[in-house]
Amino acid sequence: SVQTGGLARVARVRQLLKSENSHTYTLLAGDLVSPSALGQAIVNGTALKGLQMIATMNTLGLDYMTFGNHEFDLKEPDLLQRMSESKFTWISTNVFNKTSGNNLSYASSIPYKLLTISNVRILIFGLTIDMNTGGYVTIINSTSLVPFVREFLRTLENKSVEYDVLIGLTHLDLKTDIDLVENIPGIDVIFGGHEHEDYYLVRGLTYTPIYKADDNAISVYIHRCAFNVNKKLFRIYSTLARITSDIDDEPETAKVANYWFNMESVQTGGLARVARVRQLLKSENSHTYTLLAGDLVSPSALGQAIVNGTALKGLQMIATMNTLGLDYMTFGNHEFDLKEPDLLQRMSESKFTWISTNVFNKTSGNNLSYASSIPYKLLTISNVRILIFGLTIDMNTGGYVTIINSTSLVPFVREFLRTLENKSVEYDVLIGLTHLDLKTDIDLVENIPGIDVIFGGHEHEDYYLVRGLTYTPIYKADDNAISVYIHRCAFNVNKKLFRIYSTLARITSDIDDEPETAKVANYWFNMGMQGFIDKGFEPNKTVAILPPDVQLDGRSTSVRNFPTLLSNYSCECMVKETESNGTIIGLSNSGSIRVDDVLTGIITQYDVLRTLPFDNYVMSLSVPGALLSKVLTTGLSAIGSGMFVSYTGVHTNDNGATWLLNQDGTNIATSGENYNVATTDFEKYNTGL
């Protein structure tokens, strides 16, 4: 339960090291300004977009950093603004202005930094993985980095740039870091990022070390370096330091960090606000359409409330969306959490259209779209024909639908388009409305260049990517109406060219509610609260008051990527509930936590209900240690998804290769023992426990 991380604590570590040696430098291997839930907060009318991180790092005393792939999540004007606010230096060797070729480092970044300490010359270069260009930079791709770096070093030699120690500050995958040191023995050390977990490896003919600390300042690497001037020998003595509550905050950094955190008190989300945005856009252009990429009717704590003798089961969402003015949606995997009669009822209540191309009635084969859904929608706006198709991930069928699986979607969509062609269905613009994982969206646009744009869901976080031969954009807004994507589209009829101009709009308290939608949403909320009361709950009852320094982080961006107090406590509660069965280990999938908020101060019963809205059962199982270890390792590898594992009672020191009992350090995989585990029915049936 020790709170980990915290830049104010990192600042204190730096302060102590600086007092030990004035030649102490602080380096960061990328991903500073994004991703961040706090970066989405609207302050003084503008999203922070990493401003809070720049301000904190300026105070902490960061010296050098390279770009991470997530720096380019920001639009170019925002990133340029963040760079201009930085007191530290951005080093980038393989990121260039898109318009100037590979001759000009991006913006104010420099291609290398030459430091001299006691006559020892240290050259630092920076490299970034080519996962995300933001549409405005060029990044030398990973497969070309070895020859690129060799040529870069030759260029320095030709310019008579001399150095004694060569340091790579990289944001690359581990394989590429290894490739570099195995092929370029002149590199003395790599300080890397991107992997999210700590690594220490030695590779190559000259035994070059590669270091990566954990993300979110859970740890820092402290490197004490020595250089023998006569023998030209470099040595490094390194310690991975965990950042925990044992370390005091450095006051000035804490003050700045807390200032920006407290500025996030702006409430986000709200469909009445979304309705207001739609209303404004509709007044600007009557050809405005509102689309939703799935997961409307489930999961929801309010959906479990009993009203007039029946659980709402998404009724409140249908009623609100009908009033808001939703036009089209596709199925998400969570639509099929509902039993079939309930989903059919929700669809019959909808004033909007359900579009689904790959979901079928189970009994009719792949020939009949499910229920009242249609396989595509053909819109005509000013003689421009727009065809929308809908695709859903095959994670959940509810037992009553058939869903074409993700690995078959490319040939399936190709055949679907051929069928339309055979039926003489003509269109100018092809839009995919999808509820798929990002990899599958990318696979579609890379293999089907005829798709003009994908409006996607499922990921819970906002994404903007451009992929494929025709540079097809993929857009995903945040879940829970924290943001919406506004797309202004143009089509050149003569040249048959489609263009899209998009804005990710944060939904905050700066936006007024649209009164009718607010009225409907509030009606169902109040009915749901009364339903909970009638069932014996006291939704507004205080069940806990958290100390001022304790925060239960339930944001999707957190629980799906690393353990938080909230995910830990949820597992500990299951162990407590089943302690009569002798359970000592608890685990569940992080996707069971849906609050998408940071809980502080007063915690009510409704906070608990909205944190864990699924109607899962807690159970105690006797599980062989080898199987349990395998399930934990698989769950840890599912980072970023709802199957990322939350656990208690065990720990790993090697990124999931080995799992040890907290009680006595036993390796559960080799013990030959069974262990009593507290978990949910969902986790049991979806992991093979």
Image: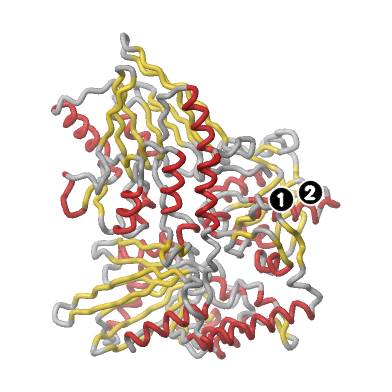
Image position of 358 (left or right of 659):
left
Dot 1 surroundings within 10 Å: few (below 14), some, or many (20 or more)? Answer: many
Residue 357, quarter of the rendered image: bottom left
Residue 123, quarter of the rendered image: top left
Q: Secondary structure at mark 2?
A: loop
Answer yes or no: is residue 14 visible: yes
Q: In the image as oriented, which residue stretches furthest toward the top?
A: 230
Which residue is rendered at x = 43% and y = 85% of the image? Answer: 327
Answer yes or no: is residue 360 visible: no
Q: How many marks?
A: 2
Where residue 277 appears, as percent x and y from the top left, is 43, 79
Disc 2 target residue: 583
Q: In the image as oriented, which residue stretches furthest toward the right?
A: 580
Q: Are marks 1 and 2 in contact (CB under 8 Å)?
A: yes
Q: Disc 1 to disc 2, how far (Cα)?
A: 8 Å
Relative height, residue 426 to residue 544 (above, below):
below
Where residue 657 appears, as percent x and y from the top left, is 57, 38
Relative height, residue 593 to residue 492 (above, below):
above
Along the line of sight, the residue nearer the viewer: 528 or 203: 528
Which residue is rendered at x = 27% and y = 72% of the image? Answer: 450
Relative height, residue 658 to residue 235 (above, below):
below
Which residue is rendered at x = 60% and y = 64% of the image? Answer: 594
Which residue is rendered at x = 77% and y = 46% of the image? Answer: 584
Image position of 416 (left or right of 217):
left
Along the line of sight, the residue nearer the viewer: 279 or 590: 279
Residue type at the position of mark 1: Gly
Disc 1 target residue: 586
Where residue 536 appears, as percent x and y from the top left, is 81, 75
Residue type at the position of mark 2: Thr
